Image (spheres, grey):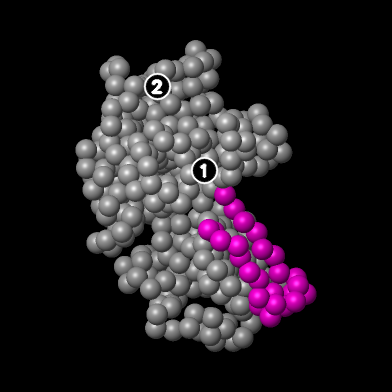
Amino acid sequence: MPQMMKAAIFVEAGRIVLEDKPVPAVGPNDALIRITTTTICGTDVHILKGEYPVEKGLTIGHEPVGIIEKLGSSVEGYEEGQRVIAGAICPSGYSNACLDGLCSQDGQMHAHGLKPMGGWRFGNTIDGSQAEYLLVPDAMANLAPVPDGLTDEQVLMCPDIMSTGFAGAESGNIKIGDTVVVFAQGPIGLCATAGARLRGASTIIAVDTVPKRLKMSEQVGADVVIDFNKTDPVEEIMRLTQGRGVDVAIEALGLQSTFESCLRVLKPGGTLSSLGVYSADLKIPLAAFNAGLGDNKIITSLCPGGKERMRRLMNVVASGRVDLGPMVTHRYAFDDIEEAYDLFSNQRDGVLKLALTP
């Protein structure tokens, strides 16, 4: 095994570069995986732009697919050479949050106190997956074997965006026969649309303005698409529901405008399921909130992680009930990762997700 590896390192705001870094040492509860495929997330772009703080020198990335290279002395139930994924959220399995049934909120203490984003460690508080090797902590809680017959790209969405998008549908408690709207059809919104279909929604409305994304939303489960540059989505949704409103509105962008639109289209007793990461204080308009008397619910979700969540998501992929493979629109070698960041952060060429391979 080599002593050094290539890794995408945060240098300063505006600069993530490919540099050499030592291959991590493996502790008793860890596993070292050799990355075979990973990707860039919108959160990584926030890091690149300096909008989300991380330590200089940190390896970025949190969506790993790879092969176990080395197991810690205390790790049981796995074999070196096994294909695995690990969730973007990698809980310890023994924290207060984990033992309270909220693995995603497994906050890790570090030099600056409790960091937001719960149990998100890869590319946040520890080195991440945009490297030739990744050290997975608490391996027995996080490593999920990839079923035979599934390709890297088929399971690439499981560690983060599939888990997050599905969580939006699950937290919204979508019921069979529900009418659901998903505001924004980026990667997370598309997965929320697919999750709404799996949960039994009979009418799914997707809102966006990028033609390729609207088309993709129909492929994964949307019944109606609304281009918000051409139509007022609130008026159109109320028309489509004969003034009743939707049972569940999923916010997948993180803007005041889309959050407010979700509120405005909810039926009395409806649920706003929020997936967006907000960068400023939200305001709740009095009328849209029914002065607090509408029996509405507002619920937020962070990407669920851990090996059991990953196993379930890969079961869904293996069943053929959802196919997120077409969301990989671009492919890059690690050596071209800076070019990949430039494409993804500027959302050029209809990019949805890209596969990075060492």
Evaluate if marks 2 and 1 touch, with contact meaning CB atoms under 8 Å apart: no
Q: In the shown orientation, is residue 76 left or right of residue 8? A: right
Instruction: Give the overall secondary structure of the magenta segment.
Output: loop
Amino acid type for the residue under numbered disc 1: Arg
Q: Quadrant of residue 346?
A: bottom left
Residue sitting nearer the eye, 188 or 67? 188
Q: Where is residue 267 in the image (x, y as percent from the top left)?
A: 66, 76
Q: Where is residue 164 in the image (x, y as percent from the top left)?
A: 51, 51
The stretch of residues the image draws in magenta is: 278-302
Q: Quadrant of the C terminus?
A: top left
Amino acid type for the residue under numbered disc 2: Pro
Q: Does the magenta stretch include residue 279?
A: yes
Q: What label does residue 312 carry, if any?
A: 1
Q: Where is residue 10 in the image (x, y as percent from the top left)?
A: 37, 39
Residue at figure coordinates x 51%, y 15% from the top left? 28
Q: Quadrant of the N terminus?
A: top left
Q: Quadrant of residue 321?
A: bottom left
Q: What label does residue 24 carry, if any?
A: 2
Residue 73 seen anywhere in this rendered image of the structure: yes
* Element marked by disc 2: loop
> Height in image: 98 above or below 227?
above
In this view, the mark in front (2 or 1): 2
* Element marked by disc 1: helix
Q: How crowded is mark 2: few (under 14 residues within 10 Å), some or many (20 or more)?
A: some
